[in-house]
Each structure stands twice: as C-alpha cells, then as structure tokens.
Image (cartoon, rainbow, N blue to C red):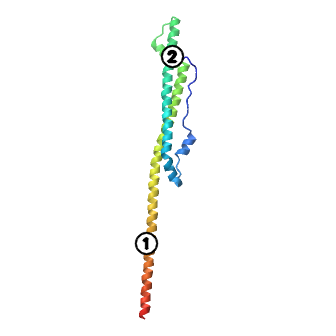
Amino acid sequence: MSDDRKVQIRNFIDSAELKRDSSINKLDLSSAMMEQSSLLVHYGELHAKAARQVDDVEIILENTIAAVYRRLRDDAASAGEKVTEAQLDKTVTRHPKVITAKKALNEAKQIESVAKIAVESFRHRRDMLVQLGAYERKEMEGEIAVRLRESRDERVQSDQNAVLAIRRAAIENQQ
C-alpha cells in the first residue's frame, strides 16, 4: 500500500439517540405510531451505510495485503533471498499495515452489528406499538361498554320511576 493514511471508520449510530428514538411513551401512542416508519427508514439507511463501510474496508484490506505481499516478495527478490509462500503469508499477516486494516475491518463490522440491532429494535418497537394499540382499543371498548351499561341502567331506573309515578297517580285518582 503506497499510502500510509489510516483507514477512517465512521460510527453511524449514537447510542443515546437510539435509546431515545426507540423508547415508547404510553401516554402518546399516536405520535409514536406516526414516527415509527420514518425512524425505521432512518436507521435502515444507517445500517446500509455501515454495511457499505464494511465492504469498503474489506477492499482496503485486500489491497493492503496484496501491496504488502508484493513489496515483501520484491524486497526478497532484490536481496537475492528465496522465500516460501508460507513464510510470506506469515510475514504479511504480521505486517503493521495489514494489522491496522484488519482492526479497521473489525471496528467497521462492530458498527454494522450495532446498526443491524438498531433496525431490529424498530421492528420490535413496531410490534409493541401494535400490541399497545390493541390493548388501548380493548380498554376503550371496555370503558364504552361500562358507560353504555350505566346509561341503560339509568334509563331503566328512570323508566321505572316514571311507571311508579304514573301508578301512584292512578291510585291517588282512584281514591
């Protein structure tokens, strides 16, 4: 590798922001439901960027290995030394540039894993929102049923009171 720049790895996911975005306020389910799909899209895009970063670092690693391999082989040839493929492989594996590129790849893979978990968390969040919405609807149906029953009982009581009043009036008229 002719250029000694360090591979820059970008962390796409802010843990505090992810925790904030993935939380659900049970008192405001409507807002949570409305923002769910846009949050899933946002974190899906971050996951795609993290996956691309892994692919890019893999290319850098492959090119670094090839460049170091060629340099070591050329240096040995110009010095008149004979080296085996196994010796070259071991030397390449321990070369600082290769180690740096492998560490960068590991870091990029870890970032991609976090991004994948973020996307998965929004799928779980969606499922929880559906369940909370169903529970809230059921609870509202129960409240409505209670109110209907109370209203019906009040009407029945009112009707009974009216019938009793009419009977009393009829009895009083007969006397």
Q: Where in the figure is residue 24, as x and y percent of width and height?
A: 52, 49
Q: Where in the figure is residue 58, as x and y percent of width and height?
A: 48, 25
Q: Which mark is residue 67?
A: 2
Determine crowd level at label 1: few under 14, some 14-19, many 20+ residues with C-alpha closer than 10 A. few
**Outermost residue, bottom side:** 175
Determine crowd level at label 2: few under 14, some 14-19, many 20+ residues with C-alpha closer than 10 A. some
Residue at point 53%, 30% (across, down): 107
Q: Quadrant of residue 164?
A: bottom left
Which amino acid is tagged 1?
Arg
Residue at point 48%, 16% (across, down): 89
Which amino acid is tagged 2?
Ala
Q: Where in the figure is residue 114, as x and y percent of width and height?
A: 51, 36
Q: Are marks 1 and 2 in contact (CB under 8 Å)?
A: no
Q: Which residue is mark 1?
A: 152
Residue at point 44%, 59% (across, down): 138
Asked if residue 118 shows in the view, the reply is no
Per the image, label 2 sits on a secondary structure element best described as helix
**Outermost residue, top side:** 80
Please tell me which residue lies in front, 81 or 148: 148
Residue at point 44%, 61% (across, down): 141
Please tell me which residue lies in front, 87 or 23: 23
Q: Earlier in the sequence, mark 1 or mark 2?
A: 2
Give the vertical position of 109 relative to 18 (above or below).
above
Give the vertical position of 124 relative to 4 (above or below).
below
Asked if residue 136 shows in the view, the reply is yes
Q: Where in the figure is residue 19, as x and y percent of width and height?
A: 55, 44
Please tell me which residue lies in front, 100 or 174: 174
Q: Quadrant of residue 100?
A: top right
Give the vertical position of 32 relative to 15 (above or below).
below
